[in-house]
Structure formats: structure tokens, C-alpha cells
Image (spheres, grey):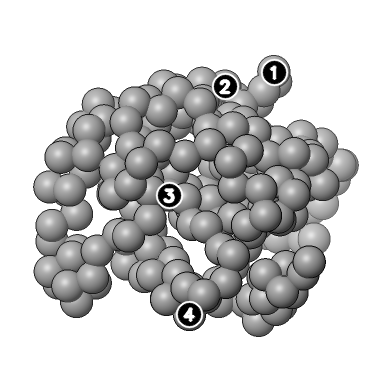
């Protein structure tokens, strides 16, 4: 990849869905036409490493909203969608959650469980009542009267490093466990409790994968 920069000092952020972000300082001198940066090493996210592995139980949960507490190990035999989101995240409340509403309705007769994982970085939402108050506007104006009808784990806000050598910090311990640094992030887990990977409700291939898992023995 090539790009043009004037002389000076710049910061280049590089990342992918499967790797943590790396910031590289570029010092462009006045007397150089071409500057070769060389390879930039990226550390894989925990989520990328979890594919094909048992899904970790959700930890550091303060309370549960919109349902009773859930253990992933009790959901064997069901396909699970873990929806990582926050009330503060526009794409989460305007796109991610409505997509989960639609999926829950479409596959209501299938062995599917949707579990919300609410992540914050402040103590503003650690009880169901606090979350309900934050979502009042969206229920009335965006969700057209619909409400969350699947259990949501309210995680304890705790800025924690993702891994040694990764300067970016997760918003909660469960985000470290799953390597989640973008919101919303949906994680697909099969009937045996194995992490399949990220799920995009707008991607036909991901929806086809979900249907196949739901219909599997």
C-alpha cells in the first residue's frame, strides 16, 4: 500500500477485525521521496484465537436485566448469539439490537438463545433500573415500542489491558475474555458451546451459517 504525506511526524493506526490496533509513528524527512515502513506486526485478538474453542463463561457481571441469570454451559443444545453492546453506542441501539429483535422473532421456534452483554466504562449502568432509564428514548422513538426480551448481563466497568504488549484497554473483563474492542460485536456459538466466530446479521453468508447450525442435529 502506498500513500502520500508531506514532511513531518504522523501517527498511523493499523488494525483488522482479528488483530489489535497498532500505532506507528512516521517521521517523514524533507529530503526523501520514498519512505519504506517495512512490516508492522499485529497481535491477534482473543476472539480470533477463540474460534473453535469452548466459549468462556461470562464473568464480572453485576446484575442481569430483562431475564434471569444465564450460564453458557446450561445452553448446550442451543445456538447462542452473544451481543456485546452499550447504551452509549449509537450503532448498538439503532442497528445491532433491532437486528437481534428481528432474529429472535424469525427463529422463535428454533433452538436459539440470544444473550446481551452490556459493557460500559463508567458506573452509570450497573443495575437493571439504570439501563431501563437509559433505553427509554430508544424504546419510544427508535424501536417503535419494542423492548428487549432476552437476558442482558450488566458487566462491571473495569478498564483492563487486552494482553501484554497491547496498549489499548478493554472496557470490562468479559471484553478481555472475548477480545471485543468494537461495539456492537455479535459472537456466534454452536450447540456444543464452541465459538464459531463473529456474526453479522446483515451478511447473507453469516445468516446462512446461523440457519445451518440451527437445523443441525
Q: Nearer the viewer, residue 107 or 40?
A: 107
Is residue 6 at least partly visible in the picture?
no
Q: CA distance from mark 3 to mark 2?
A: 22 Å
131 sits left or right of 107 in the view: left
- Residue 45 vertical position relative to residue 110 in the rendered view, above or below: above
Q: CA distance from mark 3 to mark 4?
A: 18 Å
Q: Position of residue 204 (x, y in %)?
A: 65, 81
Q: Nearer the viewer, residue 212 or 173?
A: 212
Q: CA distance from mark 1 to mark 3?
A: 28 Å
State yes or no: discs 3 and 2 in contact (Cβ < 8 Å): no
Q: Which residue is mark 2?
A: 161
Q: Check disc 3: other Cα within 10 Å, few if <14, some if 14-19, many if 20+.
A: many
88 sits left or right of 77 in the view: left
Q: Position of residue 4 (x, y in %)?
A: 68, 59
Tell which tag, 4 or 2, sits nearer the viewer: 4
- Residue 87 vertical position relative to residue 4 in the rendered view, above or below: above
State yes or no: discs 1 and 3 in contact (Cβ < 8 Å): no
The local secondary structure at tag 2 comes to strand
Q: Which residue is mark 1?
A: 164
Q: Check disc 4: other Cα within 10 Å, few if <14, some if 14-19, many if 20+.
A: few
Q: Tell me which label, 4 or 2, sits earlier in the chain.
A: 4
Tell which tag, 1 or 3, sits nearer the viewer: 3
Q: Tell me which label, 3 or 2, sits earlier in the chain.
A: 3
Residue at figure coordinates x 30%, y 59% from the top left: 148
Q: Tell me which label, 4 or 1, sits earlier in the chain.
A: 4
Q: Which residue is mark 4?
A: 106
- Name the disc covering residue 116, or none: 3
State yes or no: discs 4 and 2 in contact (Cβ < 8 Å): no
Q: CA distance from mark 4 to mark 2?
A: 38 Å
The local secondary structure at tag 1 comes to loop
State yes or no: discs 2 and 1 in contact (Cβ < 8 Å): yes
Amino acid at each position: 500500500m502506498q500513500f502520500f504525506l508531506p514532511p513531518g511526524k504522523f501517527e498511523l493506526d493499523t488494525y483488522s477485525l482479528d488483530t489489535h490496533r497498532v500505532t506507528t509513528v512516521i517521521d517523514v524527512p524533507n529530503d526523501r521521496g520514498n519512505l519504506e515502513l517495512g512490516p508492522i506486526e499485529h497481535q491477534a485478538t482473543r476472539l480470533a484465537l477463540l474460534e473453535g474453542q469452548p466459549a468462556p463463561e461470562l464473568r464480572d457481571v453485576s446484575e442481569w436485566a430483562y431475564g434471569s441469570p444465564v450460564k453458557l454451559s446450561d445452553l448446550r443444545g442451543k445456538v447462542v448469539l452473544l451481543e456485546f453492546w452499550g447504551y452509549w453506542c449509537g450503532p448498538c441501539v439503532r442497528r445491532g439490537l433491532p437486528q437481534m429483535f428481528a432474529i429472535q422473532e424469525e427463529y422463535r421456534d428454533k433452538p436459539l438463545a440470544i444473550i446481551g452483554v452490556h459493557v460500559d466504562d463508567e458506573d452509570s449502568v450497573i443495575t437493571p433500573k439504570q439501563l431501563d432509564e437509559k433505553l427509554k428514548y430508544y424504546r419510544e422513538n427508535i424501536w417503535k415500542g419494542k423492548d428487549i426480551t432476552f437476558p442482558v448481563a450488566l458487566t462491571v466497568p473495569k478498564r483492563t489491558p487486552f494482553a501484554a504488549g497491547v496498549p489499548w484497554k478493554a472496557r470490562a473483563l468479559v471484553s478481555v475474555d472475548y477480545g471485543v474492542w468494537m461495539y456492537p460485536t455479535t459472537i456466534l456459538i454452536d450447540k456444543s458451546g464452541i465459538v464459531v466466530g463473529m456474526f453479522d446479521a446483515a451478511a447473507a453468508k453469516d445468516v446462512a451459517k446461523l440457519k445451518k447450525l440451527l437445523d443441525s442435529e
